Amino acid sequence: MGDSFGDQLALREAAALLGVHYQTAYRWVRSGRLPAQLIDTRYVVSRQDLDAVDARRRAPGAPKAPSRKRIDRHAERMHVALVDGDEATARQLARRLVDEGTSVIELIQSVFAPPLRRIGQDWHDGHMPIWIEHRASAIVERVLGELAPNPRGRRRGTAMVAAVAGDQHSLPTTMAAVALRESNWHVHHLGANMPDHELVRFCAEYDIDLAVISVTNPDVAPLADHTAEQVRATDTPAIVGGAGRSLEQLVEEANALTAA
């Protein structure tokens, strides 16, 4: 059976058109936010109702994003969940904020990043074993994978996101990929520890509009810079990320490079 029912769409297709995860659309149906009918054990949404919900989401001031105090409280609860390895609670907290209007970038920078920094510092100071930090990072990466938005309409371009050989941390590349997708980029996420010549080759073979190279290990920063120069030599813009650079800055620079 296909995903369309005349003027109606299966819930999974409706979620894709709205740019949200299927489970988010399902919760909207259960709460009444997204009208739907149950046909042959499957929820279907009319195009008219889909357009109305999408219009309300895009209207100025709607939905009203959670307050700073609420986001900070969720960050504290997220810290506890990540330390305890409570993935279900971490996922629930993140989805709730996104459903309420928090952007994925704000979620990463204000709800995930502070707990991860605290956990990393506690490990560095000897107050916490390394496996807690690794487990927390893995949980965040999985949750972000589920929340990754689907680009809507015309794409800004196609981006490649990766870290060079010697940089083992994949979570920053996941964060960058999710942020770019939220800004309507099509993203090839290659992860961490990629050989520099393979990144250059990939950009050439797949007609990439933008290369983003994440750097968390300062020892490989020269290699990341060299790789970016090789990519730029093929007339492909390249951005090298690192400490002190926010996801908002990445997205702004990416959009500016391709808007020229």
Image: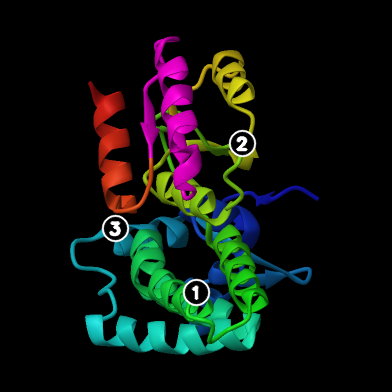
Q: Is residue 154 above or below residue 120?
A: above
State the residue position of label 3.
Answer: 58
State the residue position of label 2.
Answer: 165
Q: Name the spot of residue 70 as percent of width and height, x first.
A: 30, 86
Camera-side residue of 43 and 246? 246
Q: Name the spot of residue 199 as percent of width and height, x first.
A: 58, 25
**Can residue 215 be spotted in the picture?**
no
State the residue position of label 1.
Answer: 124
Q: Nearer the viewer, mark 1 or mark 2?
A: 1
Secondary structure at numbered mark 3: helix
Q: Residue at x 36, y 59 (%)?
A: 105
- Mark 1 is surrounded, within 10 Å at the Cα level, by few (under 14), some (14 to 19) or many (20 or more) other residues, namely few
Label 1 vs 3, first from the N-terminus: 3
Q: Residue at x 60, y 41 (%)?
A: 166
Quote the CA–CA distance across marks 1 and 3: 43 Å
Q: Name the spot of residue 33 as percent of width and height, x first.
A: 44, 76
Picture quadrant of residue 184: top left
Q: Is residue 252 above or below residue 211?
A: below
Q: Residue at x 45, y 89 (%)?
A: 77
**Can residue 24 be spotted in the picture?**
yes
Q: Nearer the viewer, mark 1 or mark 3?
A: 1
Kind of residue at disc 3: Arg
Residue range highlighted in magenta: 212-240
The answer to whether 121 appears left or right of 201 in the picture is left
